[in-house]
Image (cartoon, rainbow, N blue to C red):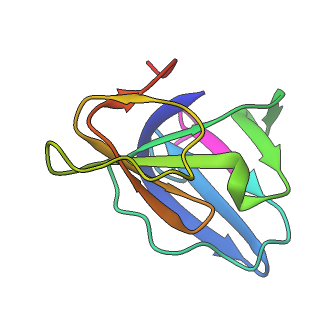
Amino acid sequence: MCGPLAGSGNSNDDAFLNLGRDYPDTGRFQIVLWDIGGVEPIPHGTTSCTMGEITLCEGVAQVELEFAGQVEIYEEAPVGAPLHPALDRPLTGPWRCRFQGSICWGAGTPAGAS
């Protein structure tokens, strides 16, 4: 699942990333990260991607995760910026990826993302 980050929030050690629409809109897609202690600030509008079982919670589609590394965040980057070796799949287009705390520069959209 990939989509534009519309907002995020924390509750105790849990973090919530809202794709497409922000909380409390029930039309949002929510990525729930349990017991991670929060996430670094992520600019709204960036493309966020994850995989997992989609469930419904109070009418909101969501994926529940246990590790921040299960979410990939893609932002626009300067054209021609080198690809960081930590990235495990190729990019095509003007994007950079924040993945488990490292920043991966590339020149494109994540392979397989739409």
The residue shown at (85%, 56%) is 66
Q: Quadrant of residue 12?
A: bottom right
Residue 60 lies in what quarter of the image? top right
- Count of labels in the image: 0
Residue 30 vertical position relative to residue 16 in the rendered view, above or below: above
Q: Which stretch appears magenta? A: 24-31
Residue at the (63%, 48%) spot, across then down: 71
Residue 101: x and y in percent read 57, 69
Residue 101 sits above or below residue 17 on the image: below
Location of residue 59 in the rendering, given as x and y in whole percent from the top left corner? 73, 33
Majority secondary structure of magenta residues: loop
Is residue 108 shown above or below 30? Answer: above
Magenta span includes 39? no
Specify the quadrant that holds the C terminus.
top left
Return the x and y of residue 48 as percentages of the image width and height: 50, 43
Q: Residue at the spot x=29%, y=49% of the render?
A: 82
